[in-house]
Image: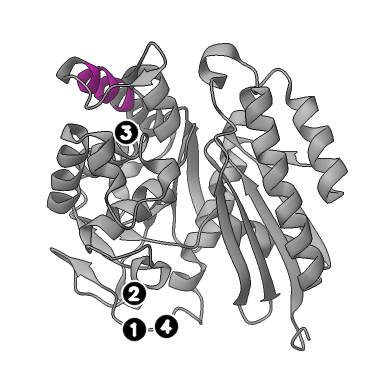
Amino acid sequence: MVPAGFSRVAAVDCGTNSIRLLVADVNPATGELLELDRRMTIVRLGQGVDKTGRLAPEALERTFAACREYAEVIRELGAGKVRFVATSASRDASNRDEFVRGVVDILGVEPEVISGDREAEFSFTGATKELTGQHQGGAERPSIEGGGRRVGDLAKPYLVVDIGGGSTEFVVGDDHVRAARSVDVGCVRMTERHLVRDGVVSDPPTEEQVAAMRADIEAALDLAEETVPLREAHTLVGLAGSVTTVSAIAQNLPEYDSAAIHHSRVSQDKVREITEWLLRSTHAERAAIPSMHPGRVDVIAAGALVLLSIMERIGAEEVVVSEHDILDGIAWSVA
């Protein structure tokens, strides 16, 4: 039963590394979002796209398998409206029509291959609605080596950073977006570009590989700063799997725990400590982290380095970690 005043919607976010589903009851009048189902599948849709410019057949099949699972969930929960948003990998691929046809056949909706700026707007809305709206709450969240403020005390403007597989979105805003930029730096793209030799991820990477990756990230930050005033932000909000996994590691969680991660805060020093360890670690050591998703083992070091580089660039003492992101923004757009 859908509560009075609410709409039941489904949002799908298909990125370079993962595809995710949110089914929720949303009330635009009150700013409430009641989550019914939220799930994520690592499909690595962007496998090889940076090199070949095409979506690999095996990557498409993994993605379509996840879509079939999601279609069943949407049907069982009775979502009346569905919106499917596709991001970086499918923007870059020459054979994206094949991807579009497959999604339409399975879910009955056409994936919207949105621009990086539109992606950034969705991410900002999803991440900050609780911080700016009447349902932000006041409970303390874990603060790892710094922080201690309540969520409602966070200072504006916000800088929302969504570190994806193929791209990273930067959005500065108060209650609304002031400036946004998407750059082609993400955990999968950086790993494939700099840390893979002869088809195998360096384990661990060399100092030269890390330096080249860092230079790429810094150049992307220069691009972002051309249009987004990164250093004017008073609160850094970090989204997506690289950031949430860093928080999980910082808290030594025995398993991935969304409730503990959402609105936790991690200091720059702790992010640096974790990043440096990840860049020195082996595949086996990273895989042994209890909160680590198997699909992130090979790309988490690159993702953490992107986060650290951003924090150092803008002088952020901490990052506020959000489990609510582009999916929630997509759900609000449907409602």
Q: Do the residues labelled 2 and 4 touch (CB within 8 Å)?
A: yes
**Of callouts 2 and 3, which one flags the residue occurring earlier in the amino acid sequence?**
2
- Work out whether residue 129 or residue 90 is closer to the camera in this orientation and state it: 90
Alpha carbon distance from label 2 to label 4: 7 Å
Alpha carbon distance from label 2 to label 3: 28 Å
Alpha carbon distance from label 4 to label 3: 33 Å
Alpha carbon distance from label 1 to label 3: 32 Å
Residue at image point 54% right, 35% down: 44
**Of callouts 4 and 3, which one flags the residue occurring earlier in the amino acid sequence?**
4
Alpha carbon distance from label 1 to label 4: 6 Å
- Amino acid type indicated by mark 4: Gly
At which x and y percent is residue 107?
82, 50
Judging from the image, what secondary structure is the residue with disc 1 in?
loop
Q: In this view, does 125 lie above or below 25?
A: above
Q: Do the residues labelled 1 and 4 touch (CB within 8 Å)?
A: yes
Judging from the image, what secondary structure is the residue with disc 4 in?
loop
- Amino acid type indicated by mark 1: Ala
Instruction: Give the numbered dot on residue 139.
Output: 1
Q: Between tags 2 and 3, which lies in front?
A: 3
**Residue tagged 3:** 302
At which x and y percent is residue 105?
87, 42
- Residue 331 in the figure: left or right of residue 2: left
**Residue tagged 4:** 137
What segment carries the magenta color?
A: 209-217
Crowd band around label 4 with a 10 angstrom C-alpha radius: few (<14), some (14–19), many (20+): few
**Of callouts 2 and 4, which one flags the residue occurring earlier in the amino acid sequence?**
4
Determine which quarter of the picture holds residue 193. Answer: top left
Determine which quarter of the picture holds residue 334. Answer: bottom right
Instruction: Give the numbered dot on residue 289.
Output: none
